[in-house]
Amino acid sequence: MKPIIYLNQYAHHRFLGSRYSGQPIRDKLETLLLENSNEGVILDFDGVSVTQSFIDEVIGFLILKYGANILKQIVFKNCSQDVKAILNFVSKSRVQDYIKSHQT
Amino acid sequence: MFLVVEPDVVKWQNDIMNYFLPSFITINNVNRVINFYQQVLCDTAQKIICDASQLKFIDPTGFGLLAALCYKLQARGISIELINVPTHFKAYLAKMSLFKTYGIEDFKENGSRFNPQNVVELLCIQERLDVDDCSYKLAEAIVGKVPGVDKNAPPDEMTGYTPYDKITIPLRYIFSELLENSLTHGKRHNYRDTKVWVALQYEPAKDLIRLATVDNGCGFLKSLYREKLTEHIEAINLALEPRVTCNGDFYLRGANKSVNQGVGLSVVKEIVTTTPGKFYLASGDALFKVKPNASISKIMSYWQGVIIALDLKTDDLKEINLPYIINSITNIGSDLTLQFE
């Protein structure tokens, strides 16, 4: 069974805006991904709104570190349309950055 | 950089120089306000007296700059006294306890004409860990006064958002990104003590939100040193371009470096400018403004740091389409598919 990170447990009145708030979540996500590489991890966004900066600190950072394949291990659950748009934007742009920085 | 000494700014009284606050301490008068600020800071007296008798209007930028001035003077061990403050401004100052911490008299609201429905807030933050708390306090201060907004109303079936969410979410997004920017970029190049003063006014009768962030950090020109620019106008133009400050190769330089995608400011500008709102940005000797037309110009005075000011209406906030705005910032073509449940 995939481990789940409930973001509403970290949110400040249902909002996660700063990069500072993203760092401990990213650390936990990275640890769980390494421990559960076969199953993956669920990120549950129920009841939470986010900024692009926060998502970049959590997801963008990991894409830059591990590449696009890391996204195959993450399931994004209960996302609003705003959250989906931000996740898509950050993920696509950071995948592009990763590819560019690893081109020889 | 040079100072323009306004003939009506100072007056000698009992061998003490009195400085007259400008009549309008606003973003539209930022040149004169900063000039006043610089003039006061050149004074070597142990006490500064500011006469507010000519004061007619002060907006959030003005509150931020006034707070920054008081902070600077206090840091130098210089006391500041405000005299002849018009009655209705006393009420504003009484609402903003920050001025009391800078040694300004604790004004009482007795007999003032301050409309209790109006909102005015002024906060100062220095650490990134305070960003989320600050954005919450400011958004709550506004939404509590918006007519007809019920915090406990059921969510809209289509969007999942309540009327409360439709105002607070974009507001918190704006506050969060602006404060994050100031504290991250502003603290570079040995500006570790950078502070951000964030102020807002809300008048329910006009449905008008005015907010401003004023920081005393390194400013855009220094922040973008890699681009080898020489003019603040160039730096502002570049800072508003998406992805300019993006660090996309951080992992190769070291996995512990901070990340930055370089779109936070662009998104905020787009949020405001898709509404009939106004957006202003000043740094160094340049001022950028949008509405009715975008323009950027040199101002005579110099601000070490960044000033951002916005005007918005809550009715327009409710209509913000964040997915559309974010996708319009840059064209990222990709076949990437995320796993959503």
Image: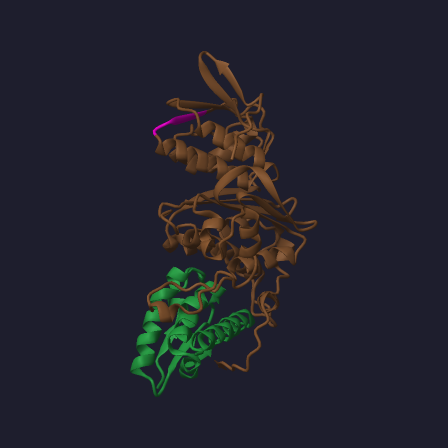
Chain colours: A green, B brown
| Percent x, y of residue A95 | 47, 76
Whether residue A34 is visible, yes or no, is yes
| Percent x, y of residue B47 | 40, 22
**Residue at 32% over, 83% down:** A36
Q: Quadrant of residue A32?
A: bottom left
| Percent x, y of residue A37 | 33, 85
| Percent x, y of residue B144 | 53, 50
Q: Residue B66 versus residue A82: which sits nearer the camera?
A: B66
Whether residue B115 is visible, yes or no, is no
> Hey, which residue is sitting farthest top in the picture?
B14
**Count of numbered tags:** 0
Residue B12 lies in the magenta stretch: no
**Residue at 49% over, 32% down:** B37
> Hey, which residue is sitting farthest bottom in the picture?
A38
Q: Residue B120 versus residue B12: which sits nearer the camera?
A: B12
Relative placement, left or right, of B264 versus B156 is left
Q: Residue A56 versus residue B58: which sits nearer the camera?
A: A56
Image position of B82 with respect to B126: above or below: above
Residue B79 lies in the magenta stretch: yes
Secondary structure that dominates the magenta span: strand
The residue stretch that appears in magenta: B77-81
